[in-house]
Amino acid sequence: MLTGVGVGPGDPELLTVKAVRLLREADLVFVPVMAERCDAPANPDGSGTGPEVVDGGGRAEGTIRSYVDDGRLRRLPFALDDRGGVTARRRAAWDAAARAVAAAFDAGATRVTFATIGDPNVYSTFGYLAQGVRALRPAVRVDTVPGITAMQDLAARSGTVLCEGREPLTLLPATAGPALFAAALAGPGTVVAYKGWRRHPELAAELRRQGRLGDAVLGRSLGLPGERIGPVDPDDGDLPYLSTLLVPARRDTWGGKL
């Protein structure tokens, strides 16, 4: 079985009991890393001079380190920062990752997990990996374990209610462009934007244009050293890829949206 395990935004204490159990029981635990961190291609069985021996693992790896011993941990490089859709580099990374997981099953592994930040069904690399593994090994069962999302963590840490009564909740990637973000802001509910990163100046400008800059909360490096939660600074030019922007719904009266 291949199980995508959501490990939350970065704090090891936010893993579910089920996630910890499956990570501890797994024959192998794969984690995604940025392709640039890997100076040699992954060997199919995860051995040799592949990415698992390169210093500087990703956020998922850092989150699960206390639950998984090094002997069962394998790194899979992904072109996480590529832009422009399914690039050749991204496709090659997906193919190589799927082959590495398929090879693990061929070598005798029966319980394989993939640790992914947040939830495996919310903007996660796991969906692409699962499709590739299914194509190579149709008999392998694929399952997922939900994880706490960054928007939930940021809402809790900032004391912000995500939605009340009849309010909608809109979650979108900033990489989809400013028009989608602007349309969501004009609606009646809370808006959450992931992956602000390079789009931060555009997001901040739209917040100011719609009079929402003062309400918004920005979370960066949640659960990690250097974490910062607070108001949006339009001049912040050093946001991490996995930053989270939370813009609560306008609420004028107590229970007014019921």
Image (spheres, grey):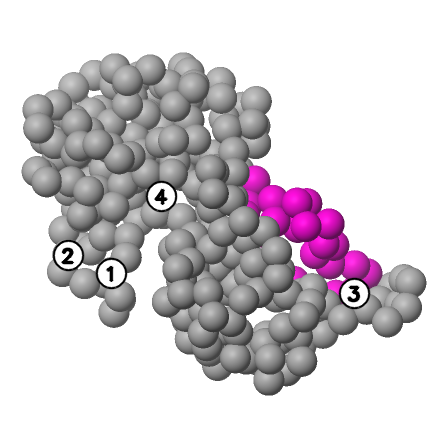
Residue receiving disc 3:
166
**Mark pair 3, 2: CA separation:** 43 Å
Label 3 or label 2, whichever comes before in sequence order? 2
Picture layout, residue 131 above or below residue 48: below
**Mark pair 1, 2: CA separation:** 8 Å
Give the percent coordinates (x, y) of residue 241.
38, 55
Indicate the secondary structure of the residue bearing disc 3: loop
Picture layout, residue 43 above or below residue 66: below
**Mark pair 1, 4: CA separation:** 16 Å
The boundaries of the magenta stretch are 148-171
Give the percent coordinates (x, y) of residue 17.
57, 22
Label 1 or label 4, whichever comes before in sequence order? 1
Residue 23's label in the rendered image is none
Q: Given contact means CB atoms under 8 Å apart, are the residues at marks 3 and 1 in contact?
A: no
Picture layout, residue 79 above or below residue 37: below
Tell me the crowding category of disc 3: few under 14, some 14 to 19, or many 20 or more residues within 10 angstroms, Cα based: few
**Mark pair 3, 4: CA separation:** 32 Å
